[in-house]
């Protein structure tokens, strides 16, 4: 009765008044399981096949009979109806203002059953009308995986928009060769943020994969699966809606489409609703159906060295870690290598990062079950991914150092250490120039006190200078202890010995006495805070934020609770953090003088019962968009608070300009709040935006970043406290900016075959190079007082003789220096502009 009622309503719809109900002459199920329906044809009309109330196929025919079908599993005869419409006055079935036949003729940019606006053909399409159209848009893993199972697969991404409105739901197929990431496609075609007050509707971001060897629902080899992202767990209704929409806009499928709930959350949802799938017509394949017997998939075949680490959800890795994940992270900074025990795809964010950074990446199903593998956790290893196997073994310090040698600074780095400041100091009295006495973390927070932000945005507190650490170390003869360790051959050659002896050193630092004057000073400092205040003691060293060495995450901060007595206990724990195995080996590798390294402490009231905390970057290095800030926010005090490891932070791209609900985009909602809520509501986004703009602009000047330096951004940490106050607790340069100075050697111009012509130049000068080895080449123009005025990125340049253009148009007349970097070699020539 319900279907009849819907059908009667359909007949009365104004757009369908010219319709005629057509008698079905014959109905059969084909060998591939699809329906075949014949009706008597009138050449002046076209025919539409309906499944219940949804149009699924549109046909024009010149034959005696018109044949209609759909590429999905056949339903019983009573589920189908056929209507006809006049060709002279066609209907508009999808209600988008364009009639059916006009849209049919404009395929694939338009589709009569898919109410999307046309987008550029290079970006995507409204339908995949042929298998060739799918092939044109699909990404293939490439020759690097030619001997891998992945080489057989094709990957194509899609968007489902307005999924909560059945009458206007629509699909866009991405040209995945051009746009590997959903967010890049969305920006290119102008997919808007959809809002309803503070409730945001999340568009469904899906992936189609063609598996040539997997048996399809039609019984033949070759299956198309559709899936969604790791933390998506869409309801049966949404999966069914997507299934029907894919069938309507991919007519060549011929019953070869199946839903793949690949990740744990989707599988859990499927298991809950299993009875509905069993009663419906959506074929479902599980991971075991696709990867049965497949325990290893190489995603990026190369090799590396690093420390093997099993990552907890939300834990941030370091640049030389070989990371092991049991769930796929939302984003991933630069690491030495990647292993997941859950299936990835070549277009996952994890693998895109691996390709970008040229690090090995593989799915290894039972890695952690192998004792030979688990015994290597925490150790330095050699890791190689090949097409049919991987290699993982313990590495010696000499191997690790040799591999990373070209990343190391050419000379020892002596961090600046000013010991002339001998007292703790209020943050507003600490400036950027005081980094040398208090550390970058403390100095930058002090600088932000001068940005005139409202009260409470920048925490009040104090900086404990390096002088305290240096005096403490000397008072207890710990420098002599470190000298003895460095002279110990076993300490230098065996990582296990290093780890054990450094652990002993830290224990002794935490138990050592304070000089009397320091005990008294810290008593005074503790008394500056109101009674009952827990005090946050944050590491702030002089060996962070150095060229080629960010030091991010190396040193631990501690909270001094009111029940712990004297503040000196927690200060000593922060001092001891200088000598963790992780921090020591990083300093050693980057040639940082251990005896000039110093620990300051940033002290302020501890935030308690926080509503949210997060990290913001004043650029988007995660998805590669422009004119946006990237925000990653989660509920409470930790980025990951769910004990099951499935906490999902909220991801937002915040427009650098503008305000209100149209000036940001939610990429991912947190799973710790209701779907109608944001962790970082609109009022906080509009408050945070100008703070980030000021922080970026002011620190760009302080760090002497060139105006067009694409790597410069500030990485900030923010919180919303229990009272609703937005607070910014840290700001540091983005790691890629800090790594820009790594491992370059000055050479004469002749070493690169470098010369410039014409010289003087008026509009364009040409750089002549003769490279022994091809690689990335870029150049900077500096004026004669050393200020950068223009950068040119030549990209990857082949070996041999080259002539590369440099635009000097618009520069003031005068002399300049052109510095060219080819790989790790830098050479300079003079150029005159007239």
Image (cartoon, rainbow, N blue to C red):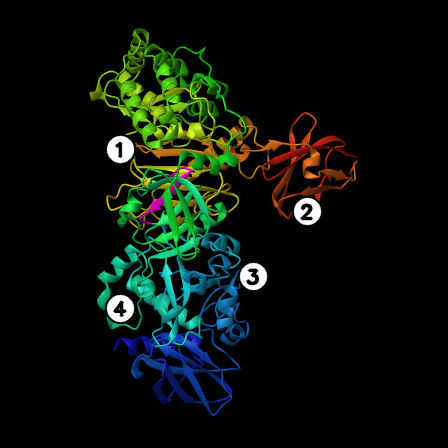
Q: Nearer the viewer, mark 1 or mark 4?
A: 4
- For marks 3 and 4 on the same chain, the one whose residue lies earlier in the sequence: 3
- For marks 2 and 1 on the same chain, the one whose residue lies earlier in the sequence: 1
321 drawn magenta = yes
The quarter of the picture where residue 213 lies is bottom left
Q: Residue at x 48, y 69 (%)?
A: 128
560 horizontally vs 748: left or right: left
> How far apart in space, not on screen, are marks 1 and 4 (Cα)?
43 Å
> How far apart in space, not on screen, are marks 1 and 3 (Cα)?
49 Å
Asked whether residue 647 appears in the rendered view, the answer is no
> How far apart in space, not on screen, are marks 2 and 4 (Cα)?
61 Å
Q: Which residue is mark 1?
A: 609
Q: Which residue is mark 2?
A: 800
Q: Which residue is mark 4?
A: 277
Circle 1 residues within 10 Å: few <14, some 14–19, many ≥20: few
**Residue 328 at x, y = what percent?**
35, 49
Q: Secondary structure at mark 1?
A: loop
Q: Nearer the viewer, mark 2 or mark 1?
A: 2
Circle 2 residues within 10 Å: few <14, some 14–19, many ≥20: few
**Residue 412 at x, y = what percent?**
51, 24
């Amino acid at each position: 009765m319900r279907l009849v009622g819907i059908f009667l309503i359909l007949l009365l719809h104004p757009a369908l008044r010219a319709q005629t109900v057509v008698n079905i002459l014959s109905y059969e199920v084909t060998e591939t399981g699809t329906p075949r329906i014949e009706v008597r044809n009138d050449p002046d009309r076209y025919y539409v096949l309906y499944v219940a109330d949804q149009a699924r196929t549109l046909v024009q025919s010149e034959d005696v009979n018109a044949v209609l079908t759909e590429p999905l599993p056949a339903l019983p005869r009573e589920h189908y109806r056929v209507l006809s419409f006049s060709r002279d006055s066609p209907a508009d079935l999808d209600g988008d203002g364009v009639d059916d036949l006009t849209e049919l003729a404009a395929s694939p940019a338009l589709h009569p059953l898919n109410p999307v606006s046309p987008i550029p053909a290079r970006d995507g399409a409204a339908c995949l009308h042929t298998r060739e159209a799918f092939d044109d848009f699909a990404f293939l893993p490439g020759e690097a995986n030619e001997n891998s199972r992945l080489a057989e697969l094709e990957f194509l991404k899609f968007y489902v928009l307005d999924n909560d409105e059945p009458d206007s739901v629509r699909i866009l197929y991405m040209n995945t060769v051009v746009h590997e990431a959903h967010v890049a496609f969305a920006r290119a075609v102008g997919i808007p943020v959809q809002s309803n007050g503070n409730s945001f509707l999340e568009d469904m971001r899906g992936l189609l994969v063609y598996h040539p060897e997997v048996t399809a629902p039609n019984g033949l080899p070759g299956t198309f699966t559709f899936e969604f992202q790791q933390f998506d767990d869409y309801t049966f209704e949404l999966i069914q809606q997507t299934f029907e929409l894919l069938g309507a806009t991919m007519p060549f499928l011929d019953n070869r489409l199946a839903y793949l709930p690949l990740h744990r959350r989707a599988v859990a949802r499927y298991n809950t609703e299993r009875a509905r799938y069993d009663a419906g017509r959506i074929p479902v394949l599980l991971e075991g159906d696709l990867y049965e017997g497949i325990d290893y998939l190489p995603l990026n075949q190369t090799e590396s060295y690093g420390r093997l680490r099993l990552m907890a959800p939300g834990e941030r890795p370091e640049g030389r870690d070989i990371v092991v994940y049991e769930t796929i992270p939302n984003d991933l900074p630069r690491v030495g290598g990647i292993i997941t025990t859950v299936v990835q795809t070549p277009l996952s964010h994890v693998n895109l990062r691996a390709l970008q950074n040229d690090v090995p990446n593989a799915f290894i199903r039972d890695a952690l079950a192998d004792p030979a593998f688990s015994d290597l956790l925490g150790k330095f290893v050699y890791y190689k991914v090949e097409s049919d196997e991987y290699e993982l073994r313990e590495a010696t310090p000499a191997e690790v150092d040799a591999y990373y040698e070209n990343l190391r600074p050419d000379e020892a780095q002596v961090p600046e250490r000013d010991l002339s400041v001998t007292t703790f100091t209020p943050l507003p009295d600490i400036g950027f120039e005081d980094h040398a006495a208090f550390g970058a973390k403390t100095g930058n927070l002090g600088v932000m006190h001068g940005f005139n932000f409202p009260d409470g945005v920048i925490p009040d507190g104090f900086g404990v200078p390096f002088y305290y650490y240096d005096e403490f170390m000397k008072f207890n003869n710990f420098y002599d202890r470190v000298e003895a360790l460095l002279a110990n051959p076993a300490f230098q050659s065996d990582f296990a010995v290093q780890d054990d002896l450094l652990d002993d050193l830290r224990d002794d630092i935490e138990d050592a006495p304070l000089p009397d004057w320091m005990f008294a000073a810290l008593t005074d400092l503790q008394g500056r805070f109101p009674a009952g205040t827990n005090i946050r003691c944050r590491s702030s060293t002089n060996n962070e934020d150095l060229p080629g060495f960010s030091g991010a995450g190396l040193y631990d901060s501690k909270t001094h609770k009111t029940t712990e007595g004297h503040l000196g206990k927690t200060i000593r724990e922060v001092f001891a953090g200088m000598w963790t195995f992780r921090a020591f080996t990083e300093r050693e590798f980057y040639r940082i003088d251990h005896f000039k390294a110093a620990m300051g402490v940033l002290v302020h009231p501890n935030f308690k019962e926080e509503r949210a905390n997060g990290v913001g970057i004043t650029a988007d290095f995660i998805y590669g968009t422009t004119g946006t800030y990237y925000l990653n926010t989660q509920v409470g005090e930790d980025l990951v608070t769910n004990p099951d490891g499935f906490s999902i932070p909220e991801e937002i791209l915040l427009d650098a300009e503008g305000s209100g609900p149209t000036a940001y985009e939610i990429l991912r909602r947190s799973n710790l709040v209701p779907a109608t809520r944001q962790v970082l509501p609109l009022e906080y986004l509009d408050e945070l935006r100008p703070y980030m703009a000021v922080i970026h602009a002011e620190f760009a000047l302080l760090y002497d970043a060139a105006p067009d330096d694409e790597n410069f951004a500030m990485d900030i940490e923010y919180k919303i406290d229990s009272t609703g106050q937005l607070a910014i607790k840290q700001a540091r340069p983005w790691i890629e900016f800090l790594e820009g100075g790594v491992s370059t050697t000055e050479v004469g111009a002749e070493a690169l075959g470098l010369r410039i012509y014409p010289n003087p130049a008026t509009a364009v000068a040409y750089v002549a190079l003769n490279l022994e080895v091809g690689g990335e080449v870029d150049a900077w123009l500096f004026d004669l007082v050393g200020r950068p005025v223009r950068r040119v990125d030549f990209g990857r340049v082949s070996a041999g003789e080259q002539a590369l253009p440099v635009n000097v148009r618009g520069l003031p007349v005068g002399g300049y220096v052109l510095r060219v970097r080819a790989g790790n070699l830098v050479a300079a020539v003079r150029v005159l502009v007239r």
